[in-house]
Image: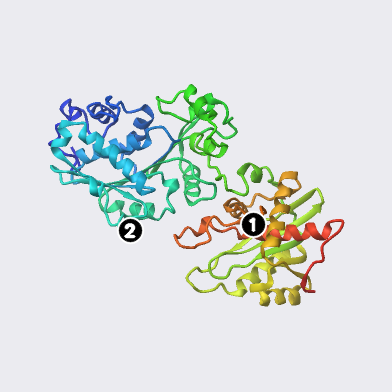
Amino acid sequence: MSSLENSGCECPACKAGLEPFTVEHFRVWALALELDNGEAWVVDDWFLVFAEDYFAGIPEVWGVVPEGNAKTTSVAGLMVYLLEHRRRAAIPWAASTREQAEIGYRQAEGFVLSSTRLRSVMKCQEGYRRIKNLVTGGRMQVFAADDAHADGIIPTDAFLDELHRHKNLRLYRTWRGKLLKRGGQMATITTAGEPGSEFEETRERIRQETPVVESRPGFTHCRSASIALHEYAVPEGGDVEDMQVVKLANPFSGITVEQLEAKRATPTMTPQHWSRFVCNLATRTDAAAIQEREWFGATDEDGVPDGAAVSLGIDFGWKWDTTSIVPLWWESDERRVFASAVILEPPRDSSSMHPDVVKRALVELFARFEVERVVLDISNAHDIAAWISDEFQVDVIDRAQTTAPKVEDYNRFMEGLRSGTLWHSGDPGLRRHALNAIARILPGGDMRFARVSDTRQGGNQDARVIDALDAAAMVHSYEVETRSMVPLEPMVAFA
């Protein structure tokens, strides 16, 4: 046995002579425990496949699995198993909220209390959501991800539950950075998140950078020496209303096609919840202004040719928000195409981005395209507006970002998407800003694009940025006005 094993273990699997930290040892060990319904715990096949990668010693193991597939129960059981068999185990488990942390602790506690043997060697400390192994000195503790002290531990085994709901991946990275100190491992069990989120960006990088060892409808298994991904989801292009297809993405043996049909039919089920939490597809919330299908359906891979006559929309952000510049090519009334956005991030250290950074970006765009005009809110960019007018001899249009123009920008942009007249080049920066936006309903019933949060506290700045969308919407709205049969009088700041 390795130095990490509990050589005095009296569990049924060890007494049967099975090798610890193997799937068979874990499976036999679990049969001695009871679920909260009083039945013996028969570990589901999908979780045994997941555990096999963990027992192989892979440092990071991800399981992205829809709701209702016994994720929390299975992870709770695996942690109790590790607590019994690791020598001086240190096992933190971070749930997304205190409520989820409580559920996780209760499941782990229930396994301990269901076993006379485990009750004799482990002590459950409910107030701390902690379980101690009185023989080995090991302990497991369940935290909420926002607990300030959740990062003060050096883990042998770290678990993160519902990572897609965490505000950011800061705690994940903190724990990952501590793994080497004790040769530790970490695992993540979660469902899909929102497109453009830090979680989904990381999930996509794992997919792209890790070799695929198995792929079948509904399941993808990627694995390398450093990370493994087990992903159950309706395949790309799959019909989310076909229950046979959806069942392939729900591996738990207790889920049937008939149960899925009943779940889908309930009046309280929304298409967004079904797509994200049952089909495991990254999906915007109900409040999202633009859904993925709308955005991706407007992709024009040809984009905007160099030398095209364009107008530029600029939204300025000097300290926290980005400065975003978006070219719009009005090819015809039936076809308007956004080129790739130029997104300039400020230092975000309380200092401002230097105006020369913006000027250099504009020089490059004027060299690439035939820029006819620039549309911006002059209120916090008087110097840049004057410089553009003097340097390039083009009209600089002042479009205030007050409520009335913002409502017009929203309405004209969304009408363009619906009618199929508005297109974009597929630029990932513009896509992220567009999919970050929510539709905010104003007191009179009008709508406008808005950030998911108006506060910068919490550190999730990447999920807040919509500046490129604002720039695109304002230049598009201005062009709609000036090209309409009865144009509104434009306000030219510099001519």
Question: Is residue 217 visible to the viewer in this orientation of the structure?
Answer: no
Q: Residues within 10 Å of mark 2 (few under 14, many from 20)?
A: few
Coordinates of residue 18 in the picture (x, y in percent): 21, 28
- Residue reaching furthest front? 444
| Total count of labels | 2
| Front residue of this view, candidates 370 and 226 | 370
| Front residue of this view, candidates 170 and 464 | 464
* Amino acid found under the numbered disc labelled 1: Leu
Coordinates of residue 345 in the picture (x, y in percent): 55, 65
- Of labels 2 and 1, earlier in sequence is 2
At 21% across and 41% down in the image, what residue appears? 86
Q: What element carries label 2?
A: loop
Numbered mark located on residue 11 in the image: none
* Amino acid found under the numbered disc labelled 2: Ala
Q: Are marks 2 and 1 in contact (CB under 8 Å)?
A: no
Coordinates of residue 270 in the picture (x, y in percent): 55, 37
| Front residue of this view, candidates 242 and 19 | 242
At 53% across and 42% down in the image, what residue appears? 282
Coordinates of residue 109 in the picture (x, y in percent): 24, 38
At 30% across and 27% down in the image, what residue appears? 37
Q: In this view, does 116 lie to the left or right of 149?
A: left
Against 387, residue 489 (above or below) is above
User: Where is residue 381, by image quadrant?
Assistant: bottom right
User: Where is residue 364, by image quadrant?
Assistant: bottom right
Numbered mark located on residue 148 in the image: 2
Q: Nearer the viewer, mark 2 or mark 1?
A: 2
Q: Is residue 483 left or right of residue 444?
A: right
Identify residue for label 1. 469
